[in-house]
Image: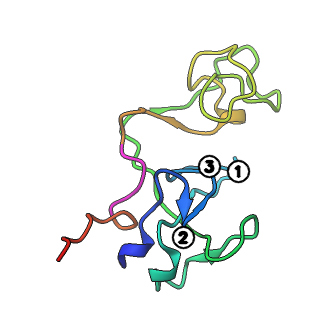
Amino acid sequence: VAWGCRCSEDGVSGGVATGIGGCADHDADGIVWCYLQMPHLCADPAAEPSVAYPPPVAWIECEVRVLHALCNSDCFFARNGWCDDGGAGAYLNRCAFGSDCHDCGLRSDPDAPTCNEAHNPPQPPLS
């Protein structure tokens, strides 16, 4: 995997600040993806140009490594169409973290790595 195919943890893709970092289901549609750090250096055919940002911004599907999955619907407000667990992307904070899985999606241990090593290899040495 080319160096440019790494997930952007800070949300910057090809020099453009998107404000969306890491590997996650950012749209809550079941597709786990990330913006690429340097899309112009990524030859992976799975990389797609962004429709929300101008070139060279691009994204790729990735895998979140979940060490401790948090996902149940124990919250009184679960399944109401609004994410209520106070986590990333939540509308409100009325439930325990991970207890509104239907509306918020799978939550993971915040200390878990964000992207699979296949899409986030170690940085090459500088020559």
Tell which circle, 3 or 2, labels the residue nearer the N-terminal end. Answer: 2
Q: Which residue is mark 3?
A: 19
Look at discs 1 and 3 and give the one toward the viewer.
Answer: 3
Residue drawn 65% across and 15% down? 95
Magenta span contains residue 18: no
The one of 64 and 37 positioned closer to us in this rendering = 37
Please provide the residue range marked out in magenta. 113-117
Magenta span contains residue 115: yes
The one of 20 and 120 positioned closer to us in this rendering = 20
Mark 2 neighbour density, 10 Å: few (under 14) some (14–19) many (20 or more): many
Residue 34 percent across, percent down from the top left:
55, 59
Residue 106 percent across, percent down from the top left:
56, 39
Residue 81 percent across, percent down from the top left:
82, 32
Residue 7 placement, left or right of 76: left
Residue 61 placement, left or right of 41: right
Q: Amino acid at mark 3?
A: Gly
Q: Amino acid at mark 2?
A: Gly
Residue 88 in the image: above or below residue 113: above
Residue 21 in the image: above or below residue 92: below
Q: Secondary structure at mark 1?
A: loop
The one of 77 and 109 positioned closer to us in this rendering = 109
Q: Which residue is mark 1?
A: 27
